[in-house]
Image: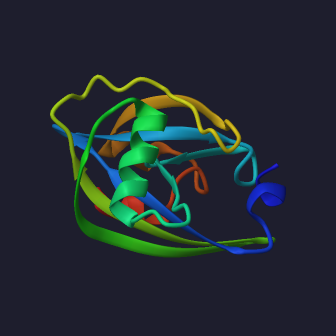
């Protein structure tokens, strides 16, 4: 499904790193990776005519129901996997409310769980279940 939706073009994706005390907010995406499990920060594609900040704010609200403030760029990555080619920008974000709820991805809902992860829990994820740079955060 992911290959059909986003394959064959370069996609710009923006993501937000939201920390609450010693935990980071991640979403479980189904159908991505070798065994269909992939945890990543909330985020998504930038739409035509939309700024990066607008896109990240919109995507974060759609997926977590949280209002955020976008801060500085923390990390960027290029992902090439089969027909998929994405450039991903990860920004630090802040929020005044941390009562996140699992929302939906209007493009094709592959979100199945929302969870706050400790550094130790990120390190316990099997290889390929999260972006490699997340392990370096911890």
* In-image side of 55 versus 66 (left or right): right
Return the residue nearer the eye: 7 or 48.
48
Residue drawn at x 78%, y 56% is 5
Residue drawn at x 50%, y 39% is 27
Query: Taking 82 as reference, is 113 above or below it?
Result: above
The picture places residue 112, in percent across and down from the top left corner, at 61, 29
The picture places residue 114, in percent across and down from the top left corner, at 47, 30
Return the residue nearer the eye: 118 or 84.
84
Query: Taking 35 as reference, is 137 above or below it?
Result: below
* In-image side of 79 versus 103 (left or right): right
* In-image side of 82 versus 11 (left or right): right
Return the residue nearer the eye: 41 or 95.
95
The single residue placed furthest to the front in the displayed view is: 49
Residue drawn at x 40%, y 43% is 60
Residue drawn at x 51%, y 62% is 46
Q: Colour scheme used in the picture?
A: rainbow
The picture places residue 56, in percent across and down from the top left corner, at 39, 54
Please identify the quadrant where the C terminus is shown.
bottom left
Residue 106 in which image quadrant:
top right
How many numbered discs, if any?
0
The picture places residue 40, in percent across and down from the top left corner, at 49, 49
């Amino acid at each position: 499904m992911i290959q059909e939706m986003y394959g064959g073009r370069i996609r710009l994706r923006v993501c937000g790193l939201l920390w609450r005390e010693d935990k980071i907010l991640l979403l479980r995406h189904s159908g991505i990776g070798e065994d269909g499990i992939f945890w990543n920060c909330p985020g998504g594609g930038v739409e035509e005519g939309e700024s990066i900040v607008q896109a990240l704010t919109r995507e974060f609200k759609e997926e977590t129901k949280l209002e955020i403030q976008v801060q500085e760029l923390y990390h960027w990555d290029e992902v090439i996997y089969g027909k998929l080619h994405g450039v991903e920008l990860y920004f630090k974000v802040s929020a005044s409310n941390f009562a996140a709820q699992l929302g939906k991805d209007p493009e094709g809902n592959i979100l199945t769980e929302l969870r706050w992860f400790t550094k130790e829990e990120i390190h316990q994820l099997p290889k390929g279940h999260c972006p490699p740079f997340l392990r370096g955060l911890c």
